Image (cartoon, helix red, strand yellow):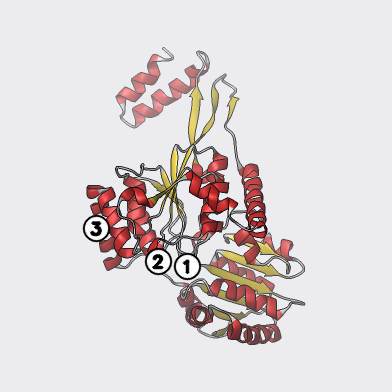
Amino acid sequence: MRRLSTQDQDFQQVFADLLAFETVNDPELLKTVDQIIADVRKHGDEHVLKLTQQFDRHPAHQFSDLELTQEALKAAFEGLNSEVREALELAASRIREFHQVQKQEGWTYVDALGNTLGQKITPLDRVGIYVPGGLASYPSSVLMNAVPAHVAGVPEIIMVVPAPNGELNPLVLAAAYLAGVSRIFTIGGAQAVAALAYGTETIPSVDKITGPGNRFVAAAKRAVFGQVGIDMIAGPSEILVYAEGENNAQWLAMDLLSQAEHDTVAQAIFITPDEQLLNDVAQAIEEHLVALPKAEIARISIANRGALVLVKDRQEAIELINQVAAEHLELCLDEAQEMAEHIRHAGAIFMGRYTPEAIGDYCAGPNHVLPTSGTARFSSPLGVYDFQKRSSLIMCSQEGVKTLAKTADILAQEENLDAHARSARYRYQ
């Protein structure tokens, strides 16, 4: 794992190169995805079934074999052992509670002229959620995508999840049951995104697609944006850990590895002004890798995109943290909340030494679908607001319209839009 110091002459260039990552700009990838989308639009269920059999080796003989029933979801939930079921229920309840607080209602007010103005908030009619599949799939992703949609009032939630060789983690189905998913199709990849965006004979088209996936999924989401809304183009998972003062190096090392084990292109960065702590964390990482089941993935990740960064002081760290705009940020120090006040860019901020990022992945409550690759500079975690849309409300009174219409008349004339001017003029003359 490379070591950097802000005192190095070439630090800024090396650090910028470390952060650089392009998710879906491969021309061949985009060409392949565009062709898949075109074929799904043309051939519908038939082509989705063909690609599912080809890429996922799914044993389905007909398209109806790819849809799971509500009875299957309920059976999966009831079949869980009590410990796992209680953990899933607790996670779901905490996620629901957080998003209930996040929900907003419409509002109106009457201005000084007697006109009524406001905003109407309406849930989307139908959304699609993409969940990574197989036996190593993520029930937490089901909860994080479906629960806020349900809280927002979306009446129909369509879920797609690939099932390689026809196998699917029962926890995913149990999570879908708890979260109120309407229909589930065991399909994945760009073909699943295309089916959700444009619809097939069986799969209804949706208004928005959310959820993480591989690079084919990311490229497909980008391609269908405009036909439907999307949450984001998700890149590899990231964590940035800042620590100072008394810390347990073993804890910090495992927090870094918790993201590195996701993917060979995941990113784990450790920043500290304490050189001894930096050395201790480096050693702890090597010790943990000996026994970590996904050590090979983690080793490649930290070798290619990881870094241990020594800074002069906390202020210099804050500047780097805002430059990175990491998906997950841990602040492991006594004054974590005070330091968080200075953080402008981060998907989620985990404050204090007793708040590992893993808690946020499963059961803290806030959403774990977060902006990556520096996009926390301008985007936010997935939330109830992503499953709602807003309409402006305007109602002029007979007296109140006079001032506004005259103003509109004048400005429309200046823009050479005569019909606009006359339309307004009729209301006050």
Would residue 369 be seen by someone viewing this image from the given angle? no
Query: Disc 1 and disc 2: Cα gap in Å?
Result: 8 Å
- Quadrant (top left/top right/bottom left/bottom right) for the C terminus: top left
Q: Mark 2 points at which residue?
A: 23
Would residue 63 be seen by someone viewing this image from the given angle? yes
Marks 2 and 3, the one that precedes in the sequence: 2
Marks 1 and 2, the one that precedes in the sequence: 2
Circle 2: residue type: Thr
Quadrant in the picture for residue 344: bottom right
Q: Name the residue under label 1.
A: 236
Circle 3: residue type: Gln
Q: Label 2 crowding class (10 Å Cα cut-off): few <14, some 14-19, many 20+?
A: some
Q: Which residue does the image show at 59% across and 68% down from the upper left?
A: 321
Q: Percent x, y for residue 370?
A: 53, 58
- Quadrant (top left/top right/bottom left/bottom right) for the N terminus: bottom right
Quadrant in the picture for residue 33: bottom left
Circle 1: residue type: Pro
Quick one: 406 or 57, which is closer to the camera?
A: 57
Question: Closer to the observer: label 1 or label 3?
Answer: 3
Query: Disc 2 and disc 3: Cα gap in Å?
Result: 19 Å
Q: Percent x, y for residue 403?
A: 49, 20
Q: Percent x, y for residue 390?
A: 49, 36
Q: What element carries label 3?
A: helix
Quick one: 377 or 356, which is closer to the camera?
A: 356
Q: Which residue does the image show at 54% across and 81% down from the upper left?
A: 295
Q: Is mark 1 on a helix, strand or loop?
A: loop
Q: Is mark 2 on a helix, strand or loop?
A: loop
Q: Percent x, y for residue 285?
A: 61, 83
Asked if the residues shown at circle 1 and circle 2 are in contact, with their CB atoms under 8 angstroms apart, the answer is yes
Q: Label 3 crowding class (10 Å Cα cut-off): few <14, some 14-19, many 20+?
A: few
Q: Mark 3 points at which residue?
A: 35
Q: Label 1 crowding class (10 Å Cα cut-off): few <14, some 14-19, many 20+?
A: many
